[in-house]
Amino acid sequence: MTAPEDPATVSIRPAAGVGDGTANTTLHRVLLGVLAATGIVTGGWAFFAARHWYDTFPGLGMSWLPPLGPYNEHFVRDVGAFFLGLAVLSVLTFVHVTNTTLVRVAAST
């Protein structure tokens, strides 16, 4: 019969995949993928088809922007460039998801 281990020296380890960050990494990748796709679609639409985006955003027969003021192509293209920039940041963070600082910056934008 072996002596029981000293409770002060027993190491308690979680099962594989629990507490090792893989669940968070997967969740971060999914959310970053959605954020990147949204930025690419909205940004590309606003940047490359500014007038159409202004007249029809958010789509599905709705038109939210004309009641807010007159069309300004420069402003609409700036909005498109902003969304494309967020998409680039999201893709970079997706690739480097282990960089927690980059993930926090992407999440706060």
Image (spheres, helix red, strand yellow):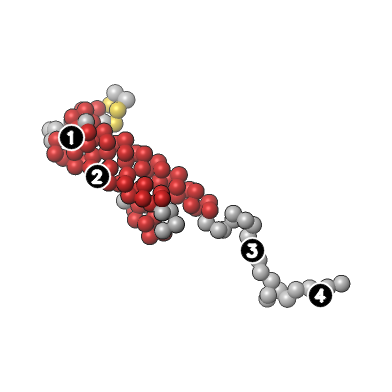
The mark that comes first in sequence, 2 or 4, is 4
Badge 4 element: loop
Residue type for callout 2? Phe
The mark that comes first in sequence, 1 or 3, is 3
The mark that comes first in sequence, 3 or 2, is 3
Question: From mark 1 to mark 2, how far is it between C-alphas?
Answer: 19 Å
Quadrant in the rendering for residue 81: top left
Question: From mark 3 to mark 2, how far is it between C-alphas?
Answer: 45 Å
> Tags 1 and 2 in contact by the CB under 8 Å rule?
no
Q: Residue furthest top?
A: 61
Q: Which residue is mark 1?
A: 68
Q: Is residue 31 visible?
A: yes
Residue at 18 percent across and 29 percent down: it is 51
Q: Is residue 64 visible?
A: no
Q: Is residue 60 left or right of residue 66?
A: right
Q: Which residue is mark 4?
A: 3
Residue type for callout 4? Ala
Residue type for callout 1? Leu
Q: Which residue is mark 3?
A: 13
In this rendered view, identify the residue nearer to me: 63 or 35: 35
Residue 80, numbered circle: none
Q: Position of residue 49 (x, y in %)?
A: 21, 31
Badge 3 element: loop
Q: Is residue 57 left or right of residue 1?
A: left
Question: From mark 1 to mark 3, how far is it between C-alphas?
Answer: 57 Å
